[in-house]
Image (tube, helix red, strand yellow):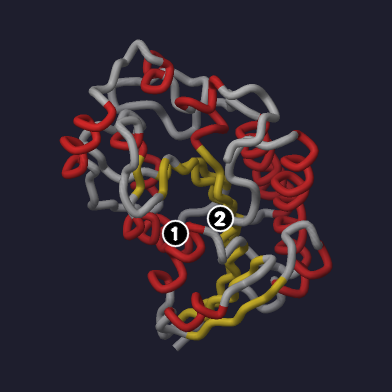
């Protein structure tokens, strides 16, 4: 039995914790990297797990962490708007270090956690009959969104230069459950998050790919065909949460930028203003 070795950066974050037990398998070795990698993730995993304490901005440490690895899932970074220099250092330099370390160690596949905020100023009016395409050009809504758009371009560069496979997942709202009316359209359930990462790790399709990270929600307006091309077949729907959330927040108003624009409220946050 061949063992697949996968490095997950940002393993101590929300999505990293969500994925560890779901991606663990007898034929997969997970290597969890975080600035304070917790043993609880390792204890919850069914398969073999290693932990590495390091920053994604430490190229030497990442190069060591990529030794013997078959694929990298890069989740580490700042996940909201923050001052430019912090975004530049952690999100952009961090992604460079991941891609460069993977290249140096001959890792053939990297999955980058991009974001809907890389195209946050795209609108419902830009969507076609099947929804908004996953590969629409970057229109970031924040320094955070800009960093994700930059990382996508950097991933494309490593594909064209070194022949790597780089999958950029434009994540919507990956949480245990939707938390407001907008997220009824953008939610990606924990199980579907794992299904998408599993597809990216195992598909025979390669090259550079942009994929929406959402579940097949009744209210979605983003096209899911790019995910289907790599074998992503999500099954969860946010609709069971709709009645409660609409009662709490009110119905969606498609004239409101929160519901009209991909990036929602990020489009109204002053650039560089730290989000709690």
Instruction: Name the N-terminal-most of marks 1 and 2.
Output: 2
Q: Which mark is residue 111?
A: 2
Residue 150, placed above or below residue 90: above
Residue indicated by mark 1? 197
Residue 42: image location, x then y, percent: 51, 80
- Marks 1/2 in contact by CB < 8 Å: the verdict is yes
- Residue 62, located in which quarter of the rendered image? bottom right
Residue beneath the point at 73% across and 68% down: 54
- Residue 179, located in which quarter of the rendered image? top left
Secondary element type, mark 1: helix
Residue 69: image location, x then y, percent: 63, 74
Locate the N terminus and report the quarter of the image it occupies: bottom left
Disc 1: CA contacts within 10 A as few (<14), some (14-19) or many (>=20): many
Residue 24: image location, x then y, percent: 43, 76
Residue 114, placed above or below residue 72: above
Task: Work out how far the residue at label 1 is from the one at label 2, CA to CA, in angstroms.
Answer: 8 Å
- In the displayed orientation, state which residue is furthest to the bottom: 1
């Amino acid at each position: 039995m061949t063992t697949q070795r996968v490095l997950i950066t940002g393993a101590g974050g929300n999505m990293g914790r969500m994925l560890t037990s779901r991606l663990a398998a007898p034929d997969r070795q997970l290597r969890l990297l975080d600035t304070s990698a917790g043993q609880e993730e390792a204890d919850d995993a069914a398969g073999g797990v290693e932990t590495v304490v390091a920053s994604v901005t430490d190229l030497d440490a990442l190069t060591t962490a990529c030794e013997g690895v078959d694929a990298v899932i890069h989740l580490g970074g700042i996940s909201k708007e923050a001052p430019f220099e912090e975004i530049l250092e952690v999100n952009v330099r961090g992604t460079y270090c991941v891609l460069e370390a993977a290249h140096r160690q001959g890792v053939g596949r990297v999955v980058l956690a991009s974001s809907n905020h890389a195209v946050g100023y795209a609108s419902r009016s830009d969507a076609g009959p099947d929804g908004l395409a996953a590969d629409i050009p970057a229109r970031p809504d924040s320094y955070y969104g800009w960093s994700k758009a930059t990382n996508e371009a950097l991933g494309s560069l490593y594909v064209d230069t070194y022949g790597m496979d780089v999958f950029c997942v434009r994540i919507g709202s990956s949480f245990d459950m939707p938390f407001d009316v907008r997220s009824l359209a953008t939610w990606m359930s924990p199980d579907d998050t794992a299904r998408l990462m599993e597809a990216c790790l195992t598909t025979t399709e390669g090259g550079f790919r942009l994929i929406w990270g959402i579940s097949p929600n009744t209210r979605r307006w983003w096209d899911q065909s790019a995910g289907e091309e790599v074998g992503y077949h999500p099954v969860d729907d946010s609709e069971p949460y709709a009645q409660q959330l609409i009662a709490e927040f009110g119905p969606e108003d498609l004239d409101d930028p929160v519901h009209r624009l991909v990036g929602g409220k990020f489009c109204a946050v002053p650039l560089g203003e730290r989000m709690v």
